[in-house]
Image (cartoon, rainbow, N blue to C red):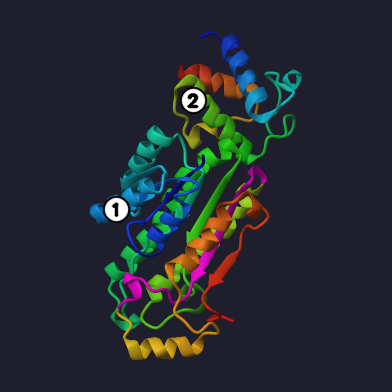
Amino acid sequence: MEVNEVFEKVKGLFVEELGIDSEKVTMDAKLEEDLEIDSLGIVEVVMAFEDEFEIEIDDDELTDVGTVGQAVNLLHSKL
Amino acid sequence: MKTVFVTGASRGIGKSIALKLGKDYRVVVGFTSSKDMADEVVEEIKKLGGESLAVQLNIADRNSVDEAFNLIEETYNHVDILVNNAGITKDNILPRMKDDDWNDVIQTNLTGNFYTSQRAIKKMIKNKWGRLIFISSVVGISGNKGQANYAASKAGLIGLSKSISKEVGSRNITSNVIAPGYIETDMTSFIDVENKENIIEQLSIKRIGTPEDIANMVSFLCEEESEYITGQVIPIDGGLTT
Protein backbone atom coordinates (compact mmCIF):
# COMPACT_ATOMS: atom_id res chain seq x y z
CA MET A 1 0.00 0.00 0.00
CA GLU A 2 1.29 3.46 -0.94
CA VAL A 3 1.86 6.11 1.73
CA ASN A 4 -0.90 8.33 0.38
CA GLU A 5 -3.35 5.41 0.46
CA VAL A 6 -2.48 4.82 4.11
CA PHE A 7 -2.95 8.55 4.76
CA GLU A 8 -6.43 8.53 3.20
CA LYS A 9 -7.48 5.55 5.34
CA VAL A 10 -6.03 7.14 8.46
CA LYS A 11 -7.85 10.38 7.70
CA GLY A 12 -11.07 8.44 7.32
CA LEU A 13 -10.60 6.83 10.73
CA PHE A 14 -9.90 10.15 12.45
CA VAL A 15 -13.06 11.57 10.97
CA GLU A 16 -15.19 8.49 11.69
CA GLU A 17 -13.92 7.47 15.13
CA LEU A 18 -13.21 10.85 16.68
CA GLY A 19 -15.41 13.19 14.67
CA ILE A 20 -12.48 15.37 13.60
CA ASP A 21 -12.97 17.83 10.74
CA SER A 22 -11.35 16.18 7.69
CA GLU A 23 -9.68 19.43 6.57
CA LYS A 24 -7.70 19.51 9.81
CA VAL A 25 -6.18 16.08 9.19
CA THR A 26 -2.95 16.83 7.32
CA MET A 27 0.39 15.00 7.46
CA ASP A 28 1.83 17.80 9.63
CA ALA A 29 -1.07 18.04 12.05
CA LYS A 30 -0.05 17.41 15.66
CA LEU A 31 -2.33 14.85 17.33
CA GLU A 32 -2.64 16.58 20.68
CA GLU A 33 -2.27 20.25 19.83
CA ASP A 34 -3.88 20.55 16.39
CA LEU A 35 -6.42 17.75 16.51
CA GLU A 36 -7.05 17.97 20.27
CA ILE A 37 -6.95 14.21 20.75
CA ASP A 38 -6.61 13.21 24.42
CA SER A 39 -4.84 10.08 25.67
CA LEU A 40 -8.03 8.02 25.47
CA GLY A 41 -8.55 9.30 21.94
CA ILE A 42 -5.14 7.93 21.02
CA VAL A 43 -6.22 4.55 22.42
CA GLU A 44 -9.34 4.73 20.27
CA VAL A 45 -7.50 5.50 17.04
CA VAL A 46 -4.85 2.86 17.73
CA MET A 47 -7.62 0.26 18.16
CA ALA A 48 -9.19 1.51 14.93
CA PHE A 49 -5.83 1.24 13.13
CA GLU A 50 -5.36 -2.29 14.43
CA ASP A 51 -8.77 -3.35 13.14
CA GLU A 52 -8.51 -1.54 9.81
CA PHE A 53 -4.97 -2.67 8.92
CA GLU A 54 -5.08 -6.02 10.77
CA ILE A 55 -1.87 -5.32 12.64
CA GLU A 56 -0.84 -5.02 16.28
CA ILE A 57 0.74 -1.84 17.60
CA ASP A 58 2.77 -1.91 20.83
CA ASP A 59 2.76 1.09 23.15
CA ASP A 60 6.53 1.36 22.67
CA GLU A 61 6.06 2.05 18.98
CA LEU A 62 3.87 5.05 19.75
CA THR A 63 6.38 7.01 21.82
CA ASP A 64 7.73 8.87 18.78
CA VAL A 65 4.36 9.41 17.14
CA GLY A 66 3.23 13.01 17.59
CA THR A 67 1.82 13.89 14.18
CA VAL A 68 -0.52 12.35 11.66
CA GLY A 69 2.45 11.89 9.29
CA GLN A 70 4.41 9.95 11.90
CA ALA A 71 1.41 7.70 12.50
CA VAL A 72 1.04 7.15 8.75
CA ASN A 73 4.73 6.27 8.42
CA LEU A 74 4.55 3.84 11.34
CA LEU A 75 1.55 2.10 9.80
CA HIS A 76 3.14 2.08 6.35
CA SER A 77 6.29 0.44 7.75
CA LYS A 78 4.20 -2.31 9.35
CA LEU A 79 2.20 -3.25 6.28
CA MET B 1 -29.58 -6.15 24.47
CA LYS B 2 -26.48 -5.38 26.53
CA THR B 3 -24.03 -8.04 27.65
CA VAL B 4 -23.03 -8.38 31.30
CA PHE B 5 -20.09 -10.45 32.46
CA VAL B 6 -20.28 -11.48 36.12
CA THR B 7 -17.17 -13.18 37.49
CA GLY B 8 -17.59 -15.75 40.23
CA ALA B 9 -21.23 -16.22 39.28
CA SER B 10 -21.72 -19.91 40.06
CA ARG B 11 -22.66 -19.25 43.68
CA GLY B 12 -23.34 -16.67 46.38
CA ILE B 13 -23.56 -13.00 45.53
CA GLY B 14 -22.39 -13.52 41.93
CA LYS B 15 -25.11 -16.07 41.25
CA SER B 16 -27.75 -13.78 42.66
CA ILE B 17 -26.50 -10.92 40.47
CA ALA B 18 -26.54 -13.14 37.36
CA LEU B 19 -30.12 -14.29 38.04
CA LYS B 20 -31.33 -10.76 38.78
CA LEU B 21 -29.84 -9.40 35.53
CA GLY B 22 -30.90 -12.40 33.44
CA LYS B 23 -34.24 -10.84 32.52
CA ASP B 24 -32.84 -7.68 30.99
CA TYR B 25 -29.34 -8.54 29.80
CA ARG B 26 -27.35 -11.28 28.11
CA VAL B 27 -25.48 -12.71 31.07
CA VAL B 28 -22.08 -14.37 30.94
CA VAL B 29 -21.64 -16.55 34.02
CA GLY B 30 -17.95 -16.64 34.90
CA PHE B 31 -16.77 -19.56 37.03
CA THR B 32 -13.43 -21.11 37.99
CA SER B 33 -14.09 -24.68 39.14
CA SER B 34 -17.83 -25.14 39.72
CA LYS B 35 -18.94 -25.94 36.17
CA ASP B 36 -22.11 -27.80 37.19
CA MET B 37 -23.27 -24.94 39.37
CA ALA B 38 -22.49 -22.37 36.65
CA ASP B 39 -24.47 -24.45 34.13
CA GLU B 40 -27.42 -24.48 36.52
CA VAL B 41 -27.35 -20.68 36.69
CA VAL B 42 -27.32 -20.52 32.88
CA GLU B 43 -30.24 -22.96 32.69
CA GLU B 44 -32.22 -20.97 35.23
CA ILE B 45 -31.73 -17.77 33.20
CA LYS B 46 -32.73 -19.54 29.98
CA LYS B 47 -35.87 -20.93 31.63
CA LEU B 48 -36.94 -17.37 32.33
CA GLY B 49 -36.45 -16.54 28.65
CA GLY B 50 -33.00 -14.94 28.91
CA GLU B 51 -29.76 -15.51 27.03
CA SER B 52 -26.79 -16.82 28.98
CA LEU B 53 -23.44 -18.51 28.64
CA ALA B 54 -21.06 -20.07 31.18
CA VAL B 55 -17.37 -19.27 30.72
CA GLN B 56 -14.54 -20.85 32.68
CA LEU B 57 -11.66 -18.61 33.75
CA ASN B 58 -9.10 -18.01 36.45
CA ILE B 59 -8.99 -14.24 36.87
CA ALA B 60 -5.56 -14.48 38.52
CA ASP B 61 -4.11 -15.59 35.16
CA ARG B 62 -4.01 -13.01 32.39
CA ASN B 63 -4.01 -15.62 29.61
CA SER B 64 -7.09 -17.24 31.07
CA VAL B 65 -8.82 -13.84 31.23
CA ASP B 66 -7.90 -13.16 27.59
CA GLU B 67 -9.22 -16.54 26.46
CA ALA B 68 -12.49 -15.99 28.32
CA PHE B 69 -12.96 -12.55 26.76
CA ASN B 70 -12.14 -13.93 23.30
CA LEU B 71 -14.87 -16.52 23.73
CA ILE B 72 -17.38 -13.95 24.99
CA GLU B 73 -16.56 -11.57 22.13
CA GLU B 74 -17.01 -14.36 19.57
CA THR B 75 -20.46 -15.10 20.96
CA TYR B 76 -21.78 -11.73 22.09
CA ASN B 77 -19.45 -9.22 20.40
CA HIS B 78 -18.38 -7.29 23.50
CA VAL B 79 -18.97 -6.81 27.21
CA ASP B 80 -21.00 -3.70 28.06
CA ILE B 81 -21.07 -4.22 31.81
CA LEU B 82 -18.43 -5.96 33.90
CA VAL B 83 -19.29 -7.08 37.41
CA ASN B 84 -16.01 -7.91 39.13
CA ASN B 85 -17.31 -10.21 41.82
CA ALA B 86 -14.93 -13.19 42.00
CA GLY B 87 -12.79 -13.37 45.10
CA ILE B 88 -11.16 -15.72 47.58
CA THR B 89 -10.22 -15.70 51.26
CA LYS B 90 -7.19 -17.20 53.01
CA ASP B 91 -7.63 -15.94 56.53
CA ASN B 92 -5.00 -15.85 59.22
CA ILE B 93 -3.70 -13.39 61.78
CA LEU B 94 -0.76 -11.39 60.49
CA PRO B 95 2.05 -13.09 62.48
CA ARG B 96 0.98 -16.41 60.99
CA MET B 97 0.09 -15.33 57.47
CA LYS B 98 2.14 -17.17 54.85
CA ASP B 99 3.49 -15.38 51.78
CA ASP B 100 1.30 -17.60 49.62
CA ASP B 101 -1.82 -16.64 51.58
CA TRP B 102 -1.02 -13.00 50.99
CA ASN B 103 0.02 -13.31 47.36
CA ASP B 104 -2.84 -15.57 46.27
CA VAL B 105 -5.49 -13.28 47.71
CA ILE B 106 -3.94 -10.11 46.26
CA GLN B 107 -3.34 -11.78 42.89
CA THR B 108 -6.94 -12.97 42.56
CA ASN B 109 -8.95 -10.27 44.31
CA LEU B 110 -6.97 -7.23 43.16
CA THR B 111 -4.69 -8.05 40.21
CA GLY B 112 -7.31 -10.35 38.69
CA ASN B 113 -9.78 -7.50 38.62
CA PHE B 114 -7.14 -5.29 36.99
CA TYR B 115 -6.85 -7.90 34.22
CA THR B 116 -10.59 -8.21 33.62
CA SER B 117 -11.19 -4.46 33.81
CA GLN B 118 -8.34 -3.60 31.46
CA ARG B 119 -9.57 -6.13 28.92
CA ALA B 120 -13.18 -4.93 29.12
CA ILE B 121 -12.49 -1.20 29.14
CA LYS B 122 -10.98 -1.01 25.66
CA LYS B 123 -14.22 -2.05 24.00
CA MET B 124 -16.18 0.22 26.34
CA ILE B 125 -14.01 3.19 25.28
CA LYS B 126 -14.66 2.30 21.66
CA ASN B 127 -18.41 2.05 22.27
CA LYS B 128 -18.45 5.16 24.43
CA TRP B 129 -20.55 3.38 27.01
CA GLY B 130 -19.80 1.02 29.86
CA ARG B 131 -20.28 0.06 33.46
CA LEU B 132 -17.70 -1.37 35.83
CA ILE B 133 -18.96 -2.64 39.15
CA PHE B 134 -16.56 -3.99 41.77
CA ILE B 135 -17.83 -6.15 44.59
CA SER B 136 -15.53 -5.17 47.45
CA SER B 137 -16.38 -5.57 51.13
CA VAL B 138 -16.94 -3.43 54.23
CA VAL B 139 -13.77 -5.16 55.42
CA GLY B 140 -11.93 -3.09 52.80
CA ILE B 141 -13.17 0.05 54.58
CA SER B 142 -12.97 -1.02 58.22
CA GLY B 143 -10.40 -3.84 58.25
CA ASN B 144 -10.96 -7.15 60.00
CA LYS B 145 -9.04 -9.39 62.36
CA GLY B 146 -7.46 -12.30 60.50
CA GLN B 147 -8.17 -10.79 57.08
CA ALA B 148 -5.26 -8.40 56.42
CA ASN B 149 -4.76 -9.86 52.93
CA TYR B 150 -8.45 -9.88 52.05
CA ALA B 151 -9.03 -6.39 53.48
CA ALA B 152 -6.00 -5.01 51.62
CA SER B 153 -7.22 -6.53 48.34
CA LYS B 154 -10.73 -5.17 48.83
CA ALA B 155 -9.42 -1.70 49.78
CA GLY B 156 -7.23 -1.82 46.68
CA LEU B 157 -10.34 -2.19 44.53
CA ILE B 158 -11.54 1.17 45.79
CA GLY B 159 -8.42 2.94 44.49
CA LEU B 160 -8.59 0.99 41.25
CA SER B 161 -12.24 1.84 40.62
CA LYS B 162 -11.90 5.52 41.55
CA SER B 163 -8.92 5.92 39.20
CA ILE B 164 -10.75 4.21 36.36
CA SER B 165 -13.78 6.44 36.91
CA LYS B 166 -11.61 9.53 36.39
CA GLU B 167 -9.87 8.13 33.33
CA VAL B 168 -12.95 7.11 31.37
CA GLY B 169 -15.75 9.34 32.61
CA SER B 170 -15.58 11.33 29.37
CA ARG B 171 -16.63 8.19 27.47
CA ASN B 172 -19.85 7.59 29.43
CA ILE B 173 -18.26 4.82 31.44
CA THR B 174 -18.90 4.67 35.17
CA SER B 175 -16.99 2.66 37.75
CA ASN B 176 -18.31 2.00 41.23
CA VAL B 177 -17.61 -0.19 44.21
CA ILE B 178 -20.22 -1.99 46.24
CA ALA B 179 -19.09 -2.90 49.75
CA PRO B 180 -21.29 -5.67 51.15
CA GLY B 181 -21.43 -6.20 54.90
CA TYR B 182 -22.43 -9.55 56.40
CA ILE B 183 -24.17 -11.44 53.64
CA GLU B 184 -25.49 -14.99 53.90
CA THR B 185 -23.24 -17.00 51.51
CA ASP B 186 -20.84 -19.97 51.53
CA MET B 187 -18.05 -17.53 52.38
CA THR B 188 -19.73 -16.57 55.66
CA SER B 189 -21.32 -19.94 56.48
CA PHE B 190 -18.62 -20.63 59.09
CA ILE B 191 -20.11 -17.99 61.39
CA ASP B 192 -21.98 -19.85 64.15
CA VAL B 193 -25.41 -18.96 65.48
CA GLU B 194 -24.21 -17.19 68.62
CA ASN B 195 -21.79 -15.11 66.57
CA LYS B 196 -24.55 -14.28 64.15
CA GLU B 197 -26.67 -12.87 66.97
CA ASN B 198 -23.75 -10.72 68.07
CA ILE B 199 -23.33 -9.44 64.52
CA ILE B 200 -27.02 -8.60 64.17
CA GLU B 201 -26.81 -6.59 67.37
CA GLN B 202 -24.32 -4.21 65.67
CA LEU B 203 -26.62 -3.60 62.72
CA SER B 204 -29.34 -0.99 62.31
CA ILE B 205 -31.38 -3.36 60.17
CA LYS B 206 -31.81 -6.42 62.35
CA ARG B 207 -30.96 -9.19 59.94
CA ILE B 208 -27.99 -10.63 58.04
CA GLY B 209 -27.94 -9.41 54.43
CA THR B 210 -28.92 -11.56 51.48
CA PRO B 211 -27.19 -11.82 48.09
CA GLU B 212 -30.33 -10.20 46.64
CA ASP B 213 -29.64 -7.04 48.64
CA ILE B 214 -26.41 -6.71 46.65
CA ALA B 215 -27.93 -7.77 43.31
CA ASN B 216 -30.56 -5.02 43.58
CA MET B 217 -27.89 -2.31 43.71
CA VAL B 218 -25.89 -3.90 40.89
CA SER B 219 -29.04 -3.91 38.79
CA PHE B 220 -29.58 -0.20 39.41
CA LEU B 221 -25.95 0.65 38.59
CA CYS B 222 -26.35 -1.13 35.24
CA GLU B 223 -29.21 1.14 34.21
CA GLU B 224 -29.07 4.40 32.26
CA GLU B 225 -30.58 6.17 35.29
CA SER B 226 -27.34 5.64 37.24
CA GLU B 227 -25.14 7.49 34.73
CA TYR B 228 -24.27 10.33 37.13
CA ILE B 229 -23.00 7.99 39.86
CA THR B 230 -19.32 7.18 39.46
CA GLY B 231 -16.18 6.71 41.53
CA GLN B 232 -18.29 5.88 44.57
CA VAL B 233 -18.17 3.27 47.30
CA ILE B 234 -21.63 2.08 48.26
CA PRO B 235 -21.80 0.06 51.47
CA ILE B 236 -24.73 -2.34 51.64
CA ASP B 237 -24.43 -3.54 55.18
CA GLY B 238 -27.59 -2.93 57.18
CA GLY B 239 -25.94 0.10 58.78
CA LEU B 240 -22.79 -1.68 60.03
CA THR B 241 -20.38 1.07 58.93
CA THR B 242 -22.66 3.96 59.91
> Residue under mark 2: which chain is it in?
A
Q: Position of residue B147 (x, y in %)?
A: 38, 77
Residue at 39% x, 39% y: name it: B72
The residue where tag 1 is placed is B40
Visible residue check, residue B148: yes
Q: Position of residue B161 (x, y in %)?
A: 54, 58
Q: Which mark is residue A51?
A: 2
Visible residue check, residue B160: no
* Disc 1 residue type (three-letter): Glu
Q: Helix, strand, or loop for circle 1?
A: helix
Q: Disc 1 vs disc 2: which is toward the camera?
A: 1
Q: Residues within 10 Å of mark 2 (few under 14, many from 20)?
A: few
Q: Helix, strand, or loop for circle 2?
A: helix
The one of B45 and A27 positioned closer to us in this rendering = B45
Residue at 64% x, 19% y: name it: A11
Q: Residues within 10 Å of mark 1 (few under 14, many from 20)?
A: some
Looking at the rendering, the stretch of residues picked out in magenta corresponds to B170-189
Q: Position of residue A48 (x, y in %)?
A: 54, 27
> Residue under mark 1: which chain is it in?
B
The one of B34 and B156 positioned closer to us in this rendering = B34
Residue at 61% x, 15% y: name it: A7
Report whether mark 1 lies on the same chain as mark 2: no
Q: Which mark is residue B183?
A: none
Name the side, left or right, on which B86 lies relative to A10: left
* Disc 2 residue type (three-letter): Asp
Whether the magenta-drawn stretch holds residue B70 is answered as no
